[in-house]
Image (spheres, helix red, strand yellow):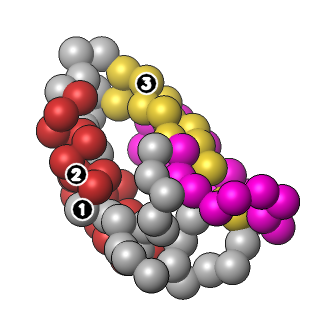
């Protein structure tokens, strides 16, 4: 969870190059610096989707990763590297 936006480029790099293979599902609400919209994120395996809508509340990132034997600290560090400040 973060109250600062992600960089779209950095989050895409996380998905493409750093997402642990032990993650098999993920979902969340994502805020990207490059977009005024709220993005609802769903991941199953290596496939993901983003559905866009307007923000009705405070902007923030919330994401949940589901998998087996996940290294929480490592994943949090990787996701924190996606944060950019406005």
Q: 72 or 1: nearer the eye?
A: 1
- 10 Å crowding of disc 1: few (<14), some (14-19), many (20+): some
Of residues 5 and 28, the one nearer the viewer is 5
What residue is drawn where x is 26% and y is 34%? Answer: 21
The dot on residue 66 is 3
x and y, in percent, of residue 41 in the image: 61, 50
Instruction: Answer with mark 3 or mark 1, whichever residue precedes in sequence.
Output: 3
Magenta range is 40-62
Is residue 79 toward the left or the right of residue 2 in the image? left
Q: CA distance from mark 2 to mark 3?
A: 16 Å
Q: Is residue 77 left or right of residue 41?
A: left
Residues 68 and 56: in front is: 56
Q: Nearer the viewer, residue 69 or 62?
A: 62
Q: Which mark is residue 81?
A: 1
Q: Residue at x 54, y 83 (%)?
A: 34
| Residue corresponding to mark 2 | 78
Which residue is at a point 24% across and 23% down the rendered structure image? 70
Q: Are marks 2 and 1 in contact (CB under 8 Å)?
A: yes
The residue located at (46%, 65%) in the rendering is 4
The secondary element bearing badge 1 is classed as loop
Residue 27 screen position, x and y as percent: 57, 38
Element carrying mark 2: helix
Nearer to us of marks 2 and 3 is 2
**Helix, strand or loop at disc 3?**
strand
């Amino acid at each position: 969870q973060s109250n600062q936006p992600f960089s779209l480029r950095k989050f895409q790099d996380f998905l493409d190059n750093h997402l642990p293979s032990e993650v098999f599902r993920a979902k969340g609400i994502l805020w990207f610096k490059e977009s005024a919209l709220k993005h609802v994120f769903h991941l199953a395996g290596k496939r993901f989707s983003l559905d866009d809508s307007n923000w009705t509340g405070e902007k923030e990132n919330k994401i949940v990763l589901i998998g087996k034997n996940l290294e929480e600290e490592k994943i949090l560090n990787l996701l924190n590297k996606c944060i950019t400040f406005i």
